[in-house]
């Protein structure tokens, strides 16, 4: 069965600045290279889901500019339904990625059109939201509109997934509508106040998130793997060891790939995480966000 995934999210054009290391205050440094690529958490997640075989729709905003046209083209090339990508009076979102030789990155984001999504935009996309198996949202678009979308999803028994990134606090109202939350360890700590370092703290953070209203939890732990708690069932799925070149879209690739394989009742959670870990491990071995996201066949060939 093909999963249907709808993403409410961000569309950014990434400018990748390749540097030896981060400059110190007041320091001027040369860059090795500079390039543009499509990105934004929403776009990355949607394209990851689509490339892994999910029937994918997107709800979002772009500016009336070349960057916006580029983002629509990239989504369409990956067979994502862009009928609910509409024009804002603000410029298309942008991200500036400082990519160090170590593979670590620091990111500056201009939200632009992503911050202008309204309830009307969400209601216009009601059909795409309620026909989905999964609705995914992140924190690069307004939380109020995510609540509106998740309410529409719940009316139709659609499974909701919240990627709480970039990290910020959110309301109990939002958490009560979340079927699955997918923070990394930093985001888990910001949401729960629990410093996530080992199996015990992963367990505590996941339980705290459930106390806050979410039903199921996956905490992604980068090169270590992912911890999950579904209801009362817990487990850990190790990551695949690779040499990372660029970790920019690792988490987004993971989430899109996960949604493409996961059963809405979470019965295959372990297998879906294993698939998502492999997809993520392939993505970090290439430069850029969208250019690095693998297809279903590429993931399966490596599993």
Image (spheres, rainbow, N blue to C red):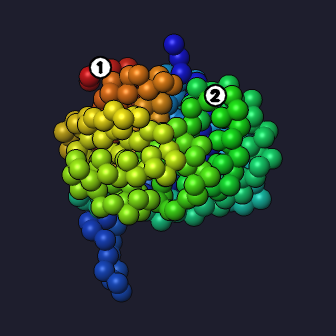
Work out whether residue 172 can be spotted: yes
Question: Measuring 51% from the left and 25% from the top, which residue is drawn there?
Answer: 264
Q: Is residue 79 visible?
A: no
* Image position of 140 (left or right of 102): right
Mark 2 residue element: loop
- Please tell me the numbered disc located at residue 62: none
Considering the image in quadrants, where does the C terminus appear? top left
Image location (x, y in percent) of residue 275: 34, 27
What residue did someone put label 2 on?
Answer: 157
Q: Secondary structure at mark 1?
A: helix
Q: Residue at x 69, y 28 (%)?
A: 156
Relative to the observer, which residue lies in front, 48 or 277? 277
Q: Position of residue 134 (x, y in %)?
A: 56, 31
Say few, some or many: other residues with alpha carbon within 10 Å of mark 1 (under 14 / 14 to 19 / 20 or more): few
Q: Picture quarter containing residue 178?
A: top right
- Residue nearest the observer in this picture, 199 or 117: 199
Front position in the image: 121 or 293: 121
Q: Is residue 131 left or right of residue 252?
A: right
Front label number (1 vs 2): 2
Sequence-wise, the earlier of marks 1 and 2 is 2
The residue positioned 41% from the left and 34% from the top of the image is 231
Residue 258: image location, x then y, percent: 42, 31
Q: Residues within 10 Å of mark 2 (few under 14, many from 20)?
A: some
In this view, 239 is above or below 89: above
x 44%, y 54%: residue: 35
Marks 1 and 2 sit apart, C-alpha to C-alpha, by 34 Å
What residue would you read off at disc 1?
Answer: 301
């Amino acid at each position: 069965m093909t999963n249907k995934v709808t993403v409410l999210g961000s569309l950014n054009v990434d400018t990748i600045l390749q540097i030896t290391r981060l400059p110190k205050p007041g320091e001027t440094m040369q860059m090795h290279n500079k390039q543009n690529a499509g990105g934004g958490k929403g776009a990355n997640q949607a394209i990851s889901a689509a490339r892994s075989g999910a029937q994918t729709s997107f709800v979002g905003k772009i500016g009336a500019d070349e960057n916006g046209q580029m983002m629509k083209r990239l989504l369409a090339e990956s067979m994502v339904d862009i009928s609910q990508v509409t024009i804002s009076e603000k410029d298309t979102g942008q991200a500036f990625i400082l990519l160090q030789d170590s593979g670590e990155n620091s990111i500056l984001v201009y939200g632009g059109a992503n911050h202008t999504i309204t309830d009307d935009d969400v209601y216009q996309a009601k059909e795409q939201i309620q026909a989905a198996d999964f609705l995914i949202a992140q924190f690069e678009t307004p939380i109020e509109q995510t609540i509106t979308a998740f309410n529409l999803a719940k009316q139709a028994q659609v499974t909701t997934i919240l990627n709480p990134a970039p990290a910020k606090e959110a309301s109990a109202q939002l958490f009560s509508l979340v079927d699955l939350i997918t923070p990394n360890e930093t985001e888990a700590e910001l949401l729960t106040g629990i410093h996530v370092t080992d199996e015990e703290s992963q367990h505590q953070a996941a339980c705290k998130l459930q106390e806050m209203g979410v039903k199921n939890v996956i905490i992604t732990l980068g090169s270590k793997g992912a911890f999950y708690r579904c209801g009362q069932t817990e487990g850990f799925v190790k990551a695949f060891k690779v040499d990372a070149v660029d970790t920019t879209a690792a988490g987004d690739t993971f989430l899109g790939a996960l949604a493409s394989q996961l059963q809405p009742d979470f019965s295959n959670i372990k297998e879906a995480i294993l698939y998502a870990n492999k997809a993520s491990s392939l993505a970090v071995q290439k430069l850029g966000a969208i250019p690095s996201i693998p297809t279903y066949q590429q993931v399966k060939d490596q599993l």
